[in-house]
Amino acid sequence: MLKLNYVSSGYHQTCVIHDINLFFEQGTIYTIVGKNGCGKSTLLKACAGLLPLFTGKIVLEGQDMNQYSSIDRAKKLTYLSQFRTLPNITVARLLEHGRFPHLGHPGRLSLADRHCIDRIIDLMNLRDLCNKPLPALSGGECQRVFLAMKLVQDTPILLLDEPTTYMDIEYQLFFLDLLTKLKEEGRTIVLVLHDLSQALHYSDRIIVMDEGQVIQTGSPKEISENGILSAVFHVKIEDHNYPFHPDI
Ligand code: ADP
């Protein structure tokens, strides 16, 4: 459970998101939507505990987020940024980093850690890429590898900023279906997605932002029917059913 109480946050002296009150329940997919620059990524970063709060507080499983050590927080939630630099290490090595919060005192991977990594390598179809250095990957492969690292971290809460960027439609749908399975296992998933159709199809709750504020939350049906998306994006929404489905 993650709760934001009157959270305002931003960068340096500039406040970007204002008075945000949100409650993220277990076993639910939330998607934050809104125009470019309205503060979606900033909200996600604040949820991850990566930005100073100007006002308010964030409560993670009953405890103030500020009271967590970074390792304890990394056992509870994982955050995928939209932008990243690529270290010159292999895919296999990057995936090992995902287990970092769970390692015991000698800091070595246990058999259980290795099994966890192996399972995700197969799940995300990364076996052939394991020995490749990250800079040698395509954009979509790289995205899959970073998502895999987040899955390896095995946290109850996943905060993912544009997780399907660069992916072929086949992998986009595979990954969004996988998120649905993870939520059914009880994980809390908070996404930023640009694709409104996917947001409406795969989410349980939509959070609509404008100018640094949450202006509405609701089910995909409520949000697609009440005119808020048309008002924010200046588009006509006729149906929230998604036209593509995995061919497997
Ligand atoms: P969105 O994700 O909705 O496109 P962002 O949260 O990325 O919007 O950005 C909201 C505002 O915060 C924008 O005006 C952007 O320029 C500003 N901003 C984003 N990141 C930074 C940063 N690292 N430093 C300063 N300002 C930033």
Image: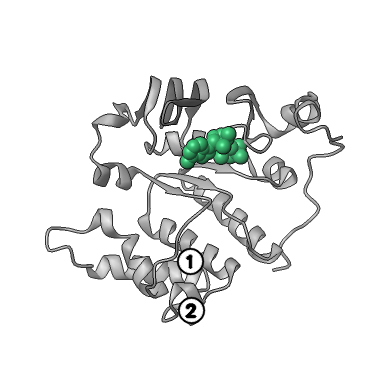
Label 2 near ligand 1 (CB < 8 Å): no
Instruction: Dividing the image into four quarters, tell me where ligand 1 lies.
Output: top right
Q: Residue at 52% across / 67% down in the picture? A: 142
Question: In the displayed structure, would residue 111 be above or below residue 183?
Answer: below
Residue 69 occupies quadrant: top left
Residue at horizontal 43 percent and vertical 34 percent from the top: 46
Mark 2: amino acid: Leu
Image point (45%, 80%), residue name:
132
| Label 2 to label 1: alpha-carbon separation | 9 Å
Q: Label 1 near label 2: C-beta < 8 Å?
A: yes
Estimate the x, y position of residue 20 in percent, counting from the top left: 51, 22
Q: Nearer the viewer, residue 132 or 247?
A: 132
Q: Which mark is residue 145?
A: 1
The spot of residue 145 in percent (x, y) is 48, 66
Image spot of residue 187 (x, y percent): 46, 44
Most foreground residue, 96 or 174: 96
Q: Is residue 229 visible?
A: yes
**Residue 52, position as x, y percentages in the image:** 36, 30
Q: What amino acid is at disc 1?
A: Val
Q: Which mark is residue 129?
A: 2
Q: Residues within 10 Å of mark 2 (few under 14, many from 20)?
A: some
Q: Is residue 71 left or right of residue 230?
A: left
Residue 48 located left or right of residue 160: left
